[in-house]
């Protein structure tokens, strides 16, 4: 009987614990090797945002400062922009939400400030992810900044900053033509 109780206890504990690779990925964010950091960030983004994933948002809570640093790091920023706003987090109970919608206004403001800085990135994909995150998190509040960034990209002759999909999202959520 004791063996059965131990087995059931072990099963319950292992089901609710995060996979070991999640802890390893968190540790790898501190690596001095950019490729290791990039892979760790990508794996964490997949863990938290992919459909069907059973992630635990408490992991973000306990690593918030490290994850903020990753949001500010050009190597890992895109993946962490996904975690914090451009994609929804899925939980084991099937719920989907934006992480920053559940934190204090001070924490949310700090992260949005960094996402606004990332909007100015020369990395097209990071700029697009940042625009998507701003749309999801603040609805139309930063509409003018997003449109300004798109126009600046065109002036620089960088057609890749046209943000077509972002402008469509903006139009859908803000009810205006791009």
Image (cartoon, rainbow, N blue to C red):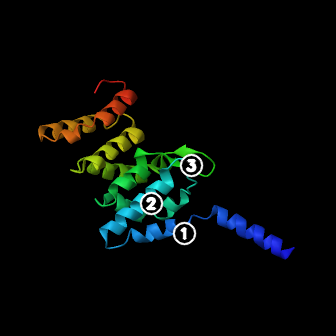
Residue situated in front as seen by the camera: 101 or 72: 72
At numbered mark 1, what does the secondary structure look like: helix, strand or loop? helix
At a point 22% along the width and 41% down the height, the residue shown is 161
Q: Is residue 111 above or below residue 166?
A: below
Q: Position of residue 8 (x, y in %)?
A: 77, 67
The residue labelled by disc 2 is 43
At a point 52% along the width and 45% down the height, the residue shown is 97
Which residue is most to the bottom? Answer: 2
The residue labelled by disc 3 is 52
Would you say the residues marked 2 and 1 are in contact, meaning their CB atoms lie under 8 Å apart? no
Q: Position of residue 162 (x, y in %)?
A: 23, 37
Q: Quadrant of the C terminus?
A: top left
Q: Quadrant of residue 6?
A: bottom right
Left or right for 105, reference 119: right
**Sequence order check: which comes first, mark 2 or mark 3?**
2
The residue labelled by disc 1 is 20
Total numbered labels: 3
Q: Which mark is residue 177?
A: none
């Amino acid at each position: 009987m004791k063996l059965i109780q131990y087995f059931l206890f072990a099963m319950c504990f292992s089901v609710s614990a995060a996979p070991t690779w999640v802890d390893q990925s968190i540790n790898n964010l501190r690596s001095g090797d950019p490729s290791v950091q990039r892979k760790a960030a990508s794996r964490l983004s997949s863990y938290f945002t992919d459909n069907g994933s059973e992630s635990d948002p408490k992991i973000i809570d306990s690593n918030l400062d490290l994850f903020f640093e990753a949001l500010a790091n050009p190597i890992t920023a895109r993946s962490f922009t996904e975690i914090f706003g451009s994609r929804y987090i899925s939980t084991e109970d099937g719920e989907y939400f934006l992480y920053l919608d559940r934190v204090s206004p001070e924490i949310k403001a700090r992260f949005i400030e960094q996402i606004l800085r990332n909007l100015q990135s020369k990395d097209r994909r990071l700029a697009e992810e940042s625009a998507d995150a701003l749309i999801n998190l603040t609805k139309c509040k930063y509409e003018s900044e997003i449109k300004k960034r798109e126009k600046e990209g065109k002036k620089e002759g960088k057609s890749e900053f046209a943000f077509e999909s972002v402008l469509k999202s903006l139009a859908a959520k803000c009810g205006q033509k791009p």
